Amino acid sequence: MDITAAEGLGPGWKVACMLAVVLLCLHSLLPHTKVAGTTDGPPVSAVSCESHKPSDYKILLGYYQLEKPTSYSQLAAVYRLFIHADYNKHYYQESDITLLQLYRPAKFSDSIRTVCLPEVNIQLLDLILCWITGWGMVNDQELLPTPRTLQEAQVGFLDNSFCESILKPPETINQTIAIQDGMLCAADFLAGKSVCRGDSGGPLVCKLNDTWYLMGLASFSTPCEKPIGPGIFTKVSYFNQWITEKQKSSPNPDPSTAPPEEKPPALFSFNSLGNVHKPRNFLVLVASQTFLLLLIFLWTMGL
């Protein structure tokens, strides 16, 4: 992400999600729901990730610098994940969202908080203060330098039709790319700011009436080179009913069956956990102390 260190948003709603022996992805905690349990972060598609086993994933919370976990950082185990049935069904990255449930509730603090789900009828024109964050690449050739500090950028929304007309699809994509109703388009063309590889799954949040709302989850983008192209996000409000249904239908996990708690690791490189990976198509969604909303973009890298 060609942006600057995250300072203006304040701590709390941003967390990191990682594959157990793989990489990391991004996610946001949603407000507390009736479903008691834990926080979660789920992979988006079978295509993006070869494993659908919850035990193959773990969630990192409360990270600002990936190489420097703090006293409030947490490592959480995933109990269950819900991948949207329509993911990539007719169009590229369609329904790019997954819901994860954690074994144990997230421990909230001044540095780990929830972000609100937007109402279906919320007007994008009313949203002036909107930000994207992530630990993705600075550009197509450059990784985020040590100590891997969370980056942020202010962006604005683009009309979906206009966005589709200027969208330059990745060369490796052989599917039809269309900006659907369940997607949002955002960037800052004047400042040259947008999402890049490794930012997928990261949140697009907007402040309205002193409340932060999770409007989008980074799904895919044009190559992050000059001139910058738009970023495409999953429109969270479009999936409100799906999120609510999954939260209500999931029983509380038995805490006695949860794996032992582990110390949050410092991630010095993509192979910090034994295997080397880099971002590849992968979405996830999670919510609150029980579930997390997020998107993941994972690629395997043979190094």
Image (cartoon, grey):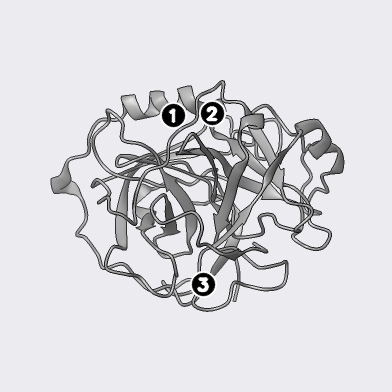
Please name the residue that numbered disc 3 is placed on: 148
Q: Along the line of sight, which residue is nearer the eye, 8 or 89?
A: 8
Which three-letter amino acid code belongs to the residue tagged 3?
Arg
Residue 288, given in percent of the width and then of the height, sits at: 35, 40
Residue at image point 46% right, 49% down: 27
Residue at image point 44% right, 56% down: 10
Please name the residue that numbered disc 1 is placed on: 243
Image height of 164 relative to 193, above or below: above
Between label 1 and label 2, give the one nearer the viewer: 2
Q: Decide if residue 177 is in sight here.
A: yes
Q: Quadrant of residue 144?
A: bottom right
Please name the residue that numbered disc 2 is placed on: 237
**What is the secondary structure assignment of the residue under circle 3?**
loop
Residue 84, given in percent of the width and then of the height, sits at: 51, 33
Decide if residue 252 is on the left or right side of residue 184.
Answer: left
Decide if residue 45 is on the left or right side of residue 76.
Answer: right
Between label 1 and label 3, give the one nearer the viewer: 3
Q: Which is nearer the N-term, disc 1 or disc 3?
A: 3
Q: Along the line of sight, which residue is nearer the eye, 50 or 292?
A: 292
Decide if residue 63 is on the left or right side of residue 240.
Answer: left
**What is the secondary structure assignment of the residue under circle 1?**
helix
Image height of 102 relative to 275, above or below: above
Decide if residue 265 is on the left or right side of residue 253.
Answer: right
Residue 4, given in percent of the width and then of the height, sits at: 60, 65
User: In the rendered image, which quarter contains the C terminus?
Assistant: bottom right
